[in-house]
Amino acid sequence: MPARQHRVTRGDDYRRIVRTGRRVGGAYCITHAVSRIQGEPARFGFIVSKAIGNAVTRNLIRRRMKTVADRRLADGLSGVDIVFRALPAIADAPFGELERELNRAIDRACRPSAEGRSSR
């Protein structure tokens, strides 16, 4: 489980990240990310609604998402706030596939915003 310094804990922070953050969709979750000052610790938040399943299922999903977050923190991720909002399909996802998707979403959400976009 991420240490307190690596968790989004306030409702205002969740709202700010979800409303203003860069959004990356996937089959199992929606990822929202907001940059912080470089060098500050990365923070993660998890939204797992009752649409996912019963309490046992929701807690299993939350623990899996926290494991992915811990691994990214161990790899040196910093300077970003990330919120994962789980979708109902996540309940049937194997851990390896879930980990690949979450890592892909983190990579896409954290890359510079000008990269990969065409000028309009």
Image: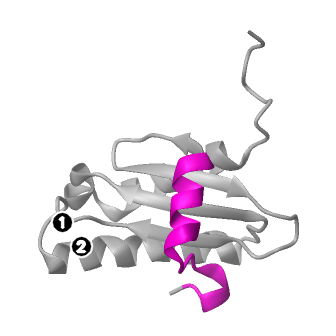
Helix, strand or loop status at disc 1: loop
Q: In the rendered image, is residue 108 in sight? A: yes
Relative to residue 39, is residue 28 depicted above or below? above
Q: Looking at the image, is mark 2 or mark 1 earlier in the sequence?
A: 1
Q: Mark number for residue 50? A: 1
Q: Is residue 112 left or right of residue 28?
A: right
- Name the outermost residue toward the left: 54
The three-letter code of the residue at mark 2 reads Arg
Q: What is the span of residues highlighted in magenta in the rendered image?
A: 2-21
Q: Residue at x 67, y 86 (%)?
A: 5
Magenta span contains residue 84: no
Pick the front one: 24 or 14: 14
Q: Is residue 53 left or right of residue 88?
A: left
Relative to residue 115, is residue 34 depicted above or below? below
Helix, strand or loop status at disc 2: helix
Q: Residue at x 55, y 69 (%)?
A: 12
